[in-house]
Amino acid sequence: METLSLIPTQQKDGRFGIFGGQYIPEVLMPAVQELEETYRQTRNDAEFHEIYTHLLKTYVGRPTPLTFAKRLTEELGGARIYLKREDLTHTGAHKINNALGQALLAKRMGKTRLVAETGAGQHGVATATVAALLDMECVVYMGSVDIARQQPNVQRMKLLGAEVRAVESGTRTLKDAVNEAIRDWVTNVRTTHYLLGSALGPHPYPTIVRDFQAVIGREAHAQILEAEGRLPDACIACVGGGSNAIGLFSAFVDDEEVALIGVEAGGEGIASGKHAARFADPARGKPGVLHGTFTYLLQDEDGQVLPTHSISAGLDYPAVGPEHAYLREIGRAEYTSVTDAEALQAFQTLARTEGILPALESSHALAEAIRRAPSLPRESILLVNLSGRGDKDLETVLKALKGRGA
Amino acid sequence: MSGIKRIAQIFEKARNQQRAALILYYPAGYPDYATSLEVLKGLAQSGADLLEVGMPFSDPLADGPTIQHATQMALSQRMNTRHCLALVRELRQQGVETPVVLMGYLNPVMAYGMERFVRDARQTGADGIILPDFPPEESADFRALCDAYELALISLVSPATPPERARQIAETTRGFLYLISLTGVTGARESLPPELEAFVARTRAVARVPLAVGFGISTPQQARRVSQIADGVIIGSALIARTGEAANPVQAAVEFIQQMFTALGKEELPRFESL
Ligand SMILES: Cc1ncc(COP(=O)(O)O)c(C=O)c1O
């Protein structure tokens, strides 16, 4: 493909195969280079790790447990299902692992102000939380569509002292919140760190976010060995930008026998065009550049970014982290999609069988496990990343169920 | 003649007239295709030294509300890269000889096909291209391609760019170096930063190419201030704000550029024939 051959193919920092890179306005180049350099130094810095690890343990609540979903497993009558409980972290989703790590980096760089984008609000809440903890100014950009569907999180951010700025441009969802956060960063780059919430954006973000989320995979790897004496047959995680998935996958990438399965938002179905499935829809999902990185992107034939749809605000994003594009290209990970209806169904099933309300994002991963488990032998193991809890989604879920006459 | 040379010539001409070159940005397809064509023609006939034709993108990261809104409007009428190139061709067919630079974002160019884009841009009569989200580190191959087709790929520096990096970027640019006046997005500003003179002087010390300053310039007084220190003055949002929704956009554009020219100290205003 001609467009691909123009991307430098040599393996260098910040590239995952041909994916990744730094496609950003010049004003941001010094900032990302500073971030890269700071991260290079802190990566092996004992003091930084001590502070970070201590806070993960005493503030975030790590390690999170691995829960065997006994009743769900019995109901499905196939593979044994384990849940990695990121819903039990402080603030209720995996996003806090990354927010804390990056905020500590920002402090090291002498930045006094954090800006962030948020879709479901979980990343916004995590950022507002660490800003309060570390005494930093915090502005969170959120599409007005998402503000309407994630009210509890909007209120939480405000109580935590953050300013929530409604974004009215474009599709008024996550993509446009990222645009506005970047515009703010462009303007205030000297004092401000952009605390990007997923494994996307320009290098070094995809690497930094993956490394801060890798704690999920490391813990799960050890925990499943302890519980079962062996590794799972598959790890399953939902993929918005891809941070919870890459965090889980990274610990299992070298274990070739473990299947890695990412689940995208299928919305109203791939054929409807109303979804956020970058990989599952070859007509719309093609390699391109958005928000500083070269990756799979939902776009029209003119290269304009297409509107997306998902019942879950955190998956409602037209691009995917570049490392996922790479893992898929080399055949190491597989990507599927789950519709709004299937996710809702999974949400209810887990609530009823295990007494856990999963986030709608996580419900996508769960739905994929529910789809697969019955036809698998009883000794096989599926490890599902429960990336967050569903409290924030109650209103959406109840409204959707009412709409479906349930 | 090579696009690079044609662009270089405008700075020479302006220097001979003891003023900065006047560079106007206008988005293709705003408020519609026909009007944008007429506005660009009007700007050329009023003596604009260089036209920047904006190619719309759904997610224009480096742009403020004025250009975002204009691009959105263009997109809603299905403006695309092919139509932008057609517009340049039409400008040329109607006798406009002013150098034209296409300004847009990487993804639509990638979708069009990079080599096909450079070839077609040259063939339709464009002289250069500016892609603010395609920094020198990433664009080496594309630059070689542009060089081969004699299309000027214009690089940008910002006040946040360290001098050594500015020197390296100046070596990659063709035609001129685009200095972003402030850290921020496009859009008219009430005042330009006080550090502007120092920024231009610092860049002058490391760059041997013409320097054009853009972002935020909106009044004749600001244009005059920039004219005194730089080789080119780039204006976009202020022009769009004035013309796009005016009863007669072409006349509004012509009046705007005449005010700017007066401020730049140009002796004689060129007559606009077809009003
Ligand atoms: C609970 C939860 N899971 C998953 C996601 C999706 O993001 P990512 O793919 O980066 O994990 C979000 C995003 O807001 C979220 O809140």
Image (tube, coloured by chain):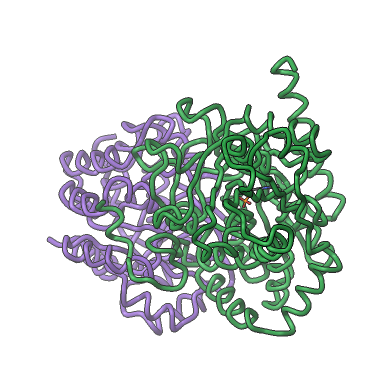
Quadrant of res A210: bottom right
Chain B drawn colour: purple
Up the image or down, A299 lies above or below B17; here it is: above
Quadrant of res B214: bottom left
Q: Is residue A296 left or right of residue B269?
A: right
Q: How many labels does the image show?
A: 0
Up the image or down, A126 lies above or below B178; here it is: above
Q: In this view, does A112 lie to the left or right of B90?
A: right
Quadrant of res A395: top right
- Name which residue lies at 59% across and 42% down: A377
Q: Is residue A167 left or right of residue B216?
A: right
Foreground residue, A224 or A285? A224
Quarter of the picture containing the C terminus of chain A is top right
Could you tell me if residue B218 is visible in this image? Answer: no
In the picture as drawn, the residue positioned furthest to the top comes out as A405
- Name which residue lies at 42% across and 41% down: A285
Letter of the chain shown green in the rendering? A
Up the image or down, A203 lies above or below B92; here it is: below
Q: Give residue A39's position: percent from left, percent from top.
A: 61, 76
Could you tell me if residue A180 is visible in this image? Answer: yes
Q: Give residue A226's position: percent from left, percent from top.
A: 73, 63
